[in-house]
Amino acid sequence: MPDRAAHYNVYMYNTIEAYYDAGDMEKANALTEKVAQNVADELRYVKTLPRRYAAAYQQDAEVGDYFVRSFAKRAQQAGQTEFAKKLEGMLQ
């Protein structure tokens, strides 16, 4: 299913995990990168909000940050060291 049909987000974690477990690094990395980019874009947007609105999205921001770091950790465990560093860089 394309991202335009159903926005890829942190709920794709199990699918990403399955690709890594199956040894399909190409699909795992491609999906992980798309999800992480979507989350990073959302986090950047939340940071642009006035404080009175940003507080409402604080939990979403924390969850997004947690999952991108989890994606990086899983990529590292799968031997995808450079890709893991790229993911962590998305949070900067």
Image (tube, grey):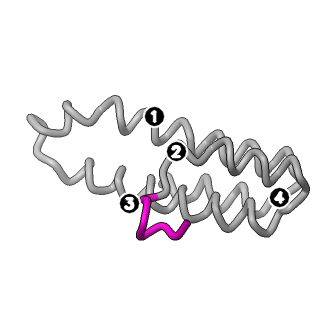
Magenta segment: does it hold 6? Answer: yes
First to last magenta residue range: 1-7
Which residue type carries mark 2?
Answer: Val
Helix, strand or loop status at disc 1: helix
Which residue type carries mark 3?
Answer: Asp
Q: Is residue 36 left or right of residue 49?
A: right
- Quadrant of the rendered image containing residue 28: bottom right
- Quarter of the image containing the N terminus? bottom right
Q: Which residue is mark 4?
A: 80
Circles 2 and 3: CB atoms closer than 8 Å = no
Helix, strand or loop status at disc 3: helix
User: For mark 1, does the 10 Å Cα neighbourhood hold few (<14), some (14 to 19), or many (20 or more) residues?
Assistant: few
Q: Which residue is mark 3?
A: 41
Q: Earlier in the sequence, mark 3 or mark 4?
A: 3
Q: Is residue 51 left or right of residue 39?
A: left
Q: From mark 2 to mark 4, how far is it between C-alphas?
A: 19 Å
Q: From mark 2 to mark 3, how far is it between C-alphas?
A: 13 Å
Residue drawn at 77 percent across, 51 percent down: 75
Q: From mark 3 to mark 4, how far is it between C-alphas?
A: 23 Å
Q: Which residue is mark 2?
A: 10
